[in-house]
Image (spheres, rainbow, N blue to C red):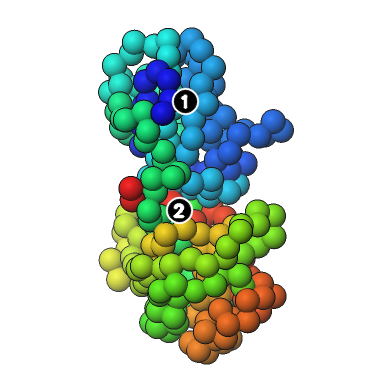
Amino acid sequence: MTDGRRIRLDLAYRGTNYCGWQRQNHCATVQGEIEVALHRIVGEPVTIRGSSRTDAGVHALHQVAALNTTGSSIPSERFAPALNANLPPDIRVFRSMEVSPDFDPVGDCTRKRYCYLIGDGPVTSPFLAGVVWDDRFGTLDADAMHTAAQTFLGEHDFASFQSEGSPRQSTVRRIYNISVKRCTTPIPFGPLGLHNENLPQVIVFEVEGNGFLYKMVRTMAGTLAAIGHGKRSVDWVAEVIAAKDRRTAGITAPAEGLYLTGITF
């Protein structure tokens, strides 16, 4: 149980200009920017707790955070517009509400969803710069990637997909849903005047699980990209999982293609 009011924030951000979610002393972070804005609004230091500690350069379409405040009488629904008036334009709070004092955006989270975008055309639209992985090694086979991705479903030891730097007690995770598909990017992300069939396309890799290891989704994306380029067979994913050795997996895909897209409580 916590003191004061408990406020939930639902927010989105473009992570390009930030060293990740978690507050750091040497560079700008999403948590740090929000806490500075909250201090201006409520007149007291405030610490927020986010459901996911996204890495440097990673984006979020839906992040959830919570804060306690003891000295503010601002209606809960007014926190969102007040924050947006004090935040940089690449961070936006789209909902704020008062919740139970026991609400924990980390402990109460049961599932997380991520999306990874890969641009594999000969020319990637400049409007997609910094928000997709600009993969220039040829067209990817999305069907082969989707078939290989199904091997991730269920509960596995994902030690082969964890990067060093943030060790966890257990590397076992459960994947509930996963897919890879090719999508056309809408105008204005492609040159005006082109017919729809000629618009730039992106590979969309989506995954939902009960939790993810450090850089796990990005390593899954890099592994699937190797399969999409025909460098590995669709059976390779099973071999990598069984190895429990990071050296056996594909590259860690760049941060700019990764999005936190949903939290389930």
Q: Residue at x 29, y 16 (%)?
A: 75
Q: Foreground residue, 225 or 129?
A: 225
Q: Position of residue 220 (x, y in %)?
A: 53, 70
Tell me residue 139's x, y (percent): 48, 78
User: Where does the image place residue 250, in percent across and percent down from the top left?
Assistant: 61, 75
Number of other residues with Cα within 10 Å of mark 1, as a class: few under 14, some 14 to 19, many 20 or more: some
Q: Amino acid at mark 2?
A: Tyr
- Residue 221, labelled with which disc? none
Q: Secondary structure at mark 2?
A: strand
Give whichever of 125, 74 is nearer the camera. Answer: 74
Q: Where is residue 34 drawn, in percent x and y? A: 49, 27
Query: Is residue 81 rendered to the left or right of residue 35?
Result: left
Dot 2 crowding, Cα within 10 Å, few <14, some 14–19, many 20+:
many
Q: Is residue 196 left or right of residue 52?
A: left
Cβ–Cβ under 8 Å for marks 1 and 2 = no
Quarter of the image where the N terminus is located: top left
204 shown above or below 130:
below
Q: Looking at the image, which residue is at 40% across and 18% down?
A: 4
How far apart are the alpha carbons under marks 1 and 2? 20 Å
Does any portion of residue 201 appear in the rendered image? no
Residue located beneath label 1 in the image: 87
Choose top left, top right, bottom left or bottom right for residue 86.
top left
Q: Residue at x 36, y 67 (%)?
A: 176
Using the image, determine if residue 114 lies above or below residue 155. Answer: above
**Three-letter code, disc 1:** Leu
Q: Is residue 99 left or right of residue 31?
A: left
The answer to whether residue 191 is above or below residue 33 is below
Tell me which label, 1 or 2, sits earlier in the chain: 1
> How many numbered circles does the render carry?
2
Q: Is residue 4 visible?
A: yes
Q: Which mark is residue 259?
A: 2
- Check disc 1 and report its element: helix, strand or loop: loop
